[in-house]
Amino acid sequence: MASFNSTGYAARLLMALALVVPLSLAPMQQALAQRGVSVVRDAEIEALVRDYARPVLEAAGLGRSGIEIVLVSDNSFNAFVAGRRIFINTGALMTADTPNEIIGVLAHEAGHIAGGHQQRLRQQLETAQTMAVISTILGVGAAAAGAMTGEDGLARGGTAMMSGGMEAARRSLLSYQRGEEATADRSAITYLERTGQSARGMLTTFERFADSMALSGNRTDPYQISHPMPRERIANLETLARSSRFFDRKDPPELQLRHDMMRAKIVAYTQGHMAASRLFRDAPRSLPALYADAIGTFLSGNARAAVAKIDALVAAHPRNAYLHEMRGEILMRGGSAADAADAFARAMRLEAAPSGLIQIGYGQALLASGTPGAAQKAVVELQTGLSRTREYAAGYRYLAQAHAQLGNIGEAELATAEGHFHSGSYRDAKVFAARAQQKMPRGSPSWLRAQDIINFRPPSRR
């Protein structure tokens, strides 16, 4: 993994002296859970971040590489890459004042992927591990010889050799990663220039890091971290950034509005009503402020008041798919499933690039409505939605419920198996897959999928 922030991930890797399992080798939820990473799924935020990333990835030569953007529920300002995925914290999205700041972050992470830094980091880790092992073997030998001969100095020298070898390996790895971070910074500037975007956001981000370090009062040894110091990064990039004819270019107003709507949603969900009010105190009647207020009212449990607030926003902005989606969420919480289904259906029609998430919400609402034929229709909608976002484990629970209502017990058990599988609960997935197979024609597509789950062997962590 390569990280935009100065969190020293490589140092933690070296402490373990082990390579992590690439996320592409196992269902993402399980791989992330092993690292204490919580994923957020939201159609509105994902669509916006994809729009931020698309031109940058094209400029980096990654437009057809299947790069995924994954949202991480974490309040810190950070992003990192693993395999073909770019992970970005909700804290970064909420903290950034402009789209340009996040686009700079994504450009940096694209630089890591395009530069093949992950593979070379693994090679450096193997080199560091070899250095540490050799120094340990030599140190143990010296210490043993000292113990046998009674030479305390030799024994102490062996111990020093072991610790010195580990420290040399660690410093070598950190030095290497600082170089890769600097390279990714320069690549990001190149991608922004190619796409006609400003690098001002990158400088703003590094200024934020520098101010945070200054306020902490802690003195940081620049040789003990995995990233260049923020002031060093600014010095290395500022001349290049300011020389671009795009440096003073601002984000389009419509993109800034989408950014602020995203921030409104994140702050309302993660920090509450009061934090949202503080964030938009300079524009309390703006659309993002009112959006955050409606969400905050919904989360406080007052569904009726929340519906009234979101209805006013929908009336003023009837083409906004995500206002309709939020209306559906609020109506579901308030027990009006049929009305919620109508809201989700409207959101689906307006969504520019169907993600599957809104369609799954629609299927859930149909199922909860209990209207004639709703369960059969819910199966179709849920299956289509899940075909677009296969790793969304919660969607399989709704699909299982829909199949169960229709009496399709084998399909219900297969959907349950899928949900467990994508949650990383492999044992439960195999149990339900085996149960499903008993109720299916041998060799049918569903039977074969159940067999795939039964045969799956999760990769062991090295």
Image (spheres, rainbow, N blue to C red):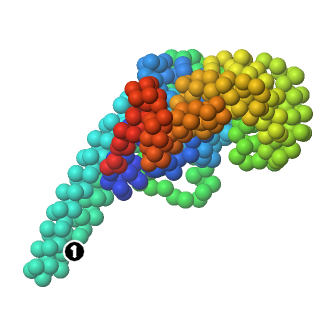
Label 1 belongs to which residue?
156
Asked if 359 appears above or below 136 in the picture, the reply is above
In this picture, residue 69 sits left or right of residue 123? right
For mark 1, does the 10 Å Cα neighbourhood hold few (<14), some (14 to 19), or many (20 or more) residues? some
Q: In this rendered view, identify the residue nearer to me: 158 or 310.
A: 310
Q: Quadrant of residue 144?
A: bottom left
The answer to which of 385 and 319 lies nearer the viewer is 385
Looking at the image, can residue 108 be seen? Answer: no
Quadrant where the image shows the N terminus:
top left
For residue 378, what is the image quadrant?
A: top right
x 14%, y 69%: residue: 142
Above or below, comparing residue 332 to residue 461 in the picture: above
The amino acid sitting under disc 1 is: Arg
Where residue 317 appears, as percent x and y from the top left, is 83, 21
Q: Residue at x 31, y 58 (%)?
A: 167
Residue in the image at 45% along x and 37% along y: 438
* Residue 350 visible at all: yes
Residue at 42 percent across and 37 percent down: it is 453
Where's residue 351, x and y in %? Answer: 69, 20
Q: Position of residue 71 (x, y in %)?
A: 58, 37
In the displayed structure, 115 sits above or below 234; it is: above
Outermost residue toward the bottom in this view? 150
Measured as percent of width and height from the top left, residue 332 is found at 78, 36
The residue positioned farthest toward the left in the image shown:
149
Q: Is residue 383 left or right of residue 303?
A: left
In the structure shown, which secondary structural element does the residue marked by tag 1 occupy?
helix
Left or right for 132, reference 325:
left
